[in-house]
Image (spheres, rainbow, N blue to C red):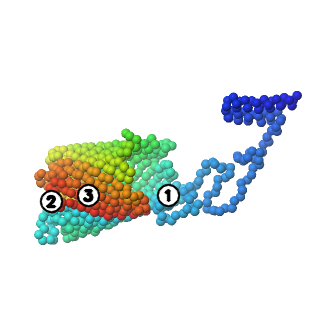
Amino acid sequence: MRAELRSRIVCASIGIATIAAFCTNSRVVAQQATAVVPGVLEVLGILPAPTYDPAESQIPRRRPGHAYEPPPEFNVQNPDGLPPAPVDQAGAFLPVPDRWRIMEALGFKFPLTDPYNQNVLKGDKPIDGKDHFLALSFISDSFIKEQSTPLPVGPQGTGRAGEIDVLGHVNQAAFVQNFIASADYYIGDTTFKPPEIEYKATLAVDYNRVNTQEARSLQIDPRLGEDRDDGFVGVQELWVDKHLRNLDSRYDFDSLRIGIQPFSTDFRGFLFQDSEPGIRLFGDRDNNRWQYNLAYFRRLEKDLNSGLNDVTKAPRHDDILLGNLYRQDFPWTGFTSQATVVFNHNSDDRFYDSNGFIERPAAIGLQLPRTYDVAYLGYNGDGHIGRLNLTASTYYLIGHQSHGIFVEEEQQIRAGFAAAEASMDFDWIRVRLSGAYASGDKNPYSDRATGFDSILENPIFAGADTSYWISQGIPLIGGGGVALTQPNGMLPDLRSSNAQGQSNFDNPGLRLIGLGADFDIAPTSRVSGNLNELWFDNTATLEAARQQANIGRSIGTDASVAWIYRPFFTQNVVVRLSGAALLPGSGFKSLYGTDHSVYYSVLANVILTY
């Protein structure tokens, strides 16, 4: 009777599991019901109860019904390699104490002189096996340049009989060699988050030799001749960056950077792009969709011939306070918008440069020391709208200065600037359209200055330093020791120099329309061409400076072409050859005469980077 009861219970248990699986059509229910059966059989005494073995309970994984088998013994083939994961942790996540050297353990080792593969000197792996990194870089930048630029005849004479004209020979040549060494030391696991603390130092060594055909064009002492050799060592970076906090799991952060550091107020370097001492608070929010900067800089004196920072001299009385805010994917996906406010206070003292020329105040107009306070309100955007690539920038300038260039009364300053460049790719060709406007001063003798000027521009725009107009510094003959334009500058601002002079808001302004194209003829070669048409916005300031009426507005047509070659598909070796020509317009001819129908510039540049 008892055996029959047990048999019925067993059959009922099996039937319950089968019916439940069939009725619910659920594999999970079937498994749960079937699992009940062994327990029922053990209770009825049909199956023996399992025994508890303390030794086996310590083994988390083994085959059911089999005793624990230790892993087989293997001979060690690579004693320096990382040990394999234990059998009982196969498939589990295991931390690797030095994941950067896994490739070395497998036999992939590269010399320190190899910049293309894993290298401890480039920050590819830590110097201590933990989270201390060192990144070294070395750059050699060499270029040779031939150009023709209007130059004045020296007031002491040229040394050549019969030459008493205002303008002299135009041909010039320059050789410049720069060596840049940088060391970047930082601490932290930087795979997904910023370093905890970072230190960086960059030194630049410059040698330059310039030859002209006119005495006193390079140095104020005419006995020094028509050539100049010069060298300088500048401190371009020296800062510490402290990571203040992480805000969330996406590592949105706040950081503080103090020291000589590079900074640009916009995407193309229209307003201020330099490396100056300051303090900067920066970070991001919302998974890096919002980014911000709050910064204060006090400008250093520059070595005029090299443009490098001169830390042996006291800083200038030139203070910059700024704040900007970036928003990604606004107002369109793929486009970044930036709003910026920049305040510039300048009360610089009188200053003569290393060549003996006066820099402050500029040798134009009243030549009195000048103080100004100005604010720039700007919007900048960069990105793409579908296939259309777009960069746009606009600034409104408001402020006042102690007196004007031509009047002793205080002046209000109101000026504007706008620039945009649109491009589109067609397979291996990119076509670009550029336009820029900087307001000029309509009346230099009024109580309002309306000429737009930057703090220190370095525009990457309309051909950049390939363009004749942007790459050359063109003296304003008859206006004293000032230039119509500065090297690597787009604005005709009549300053003594970009590096050491003050901003000048009594200037003729600029209008520019340009068409360009880039041709990727091979993975290692690119050819770029640009054609720009240029005008002064208003020539009233030029007429006042030159005491000359009816100066035309047309600057001329600027045509340039450049070939860039990267033999190793990287930026480690870059060779660039470029040529540019300016066909003068009526305004340029009014200033510099009609003796030359074209002005030219030819450049050969080699950059080597480790």
Q: Residues within 10 Å of mark 2 (few under 14, many from 20)?
A: few
User: Which residue shows up at 22% across the image and 60% down it?
Assistant: 599
Mark 1 vs mark 3, CA separation in Å: 40 Å
| 253 shown above or below 605 | above
Q: Residues within 10 Å of mark 3 (few under 14, many from 20)?
A: many
Instruction: Choose between 215 and 608: the one closer to the eye.
Output: 608
Q: Helix or strand or loop: what does disc 1 sit on? A: loop
Image spot of residue 46 (x, y percent): 83, 36
Which residue corresponds to mark 3? 468
Q: Residues within 10 Å of mark 1 (few under 14, many from 20)?
A: some
Q: Nearer the viewer, mark 1 or mark 2?
A: 2
Which picture quadrant has residue 446?
top left
Tell me the amino acid under the disc marked 2.
Answer: Thr
Q: Nearer the viewer, mark 1 or mark 3?
A: 3
On the question of residue 175 being in view, the answer is yes
Tell me the amino acid under the disc marked 1.
Answer: Asp
Tell me which label, 1 or 2, sits earlier in the chain.
1
The quarter of the rendered structure image containing the C terminus is bottom left
Image spot of residue 273 (x, y percent): 33, 52
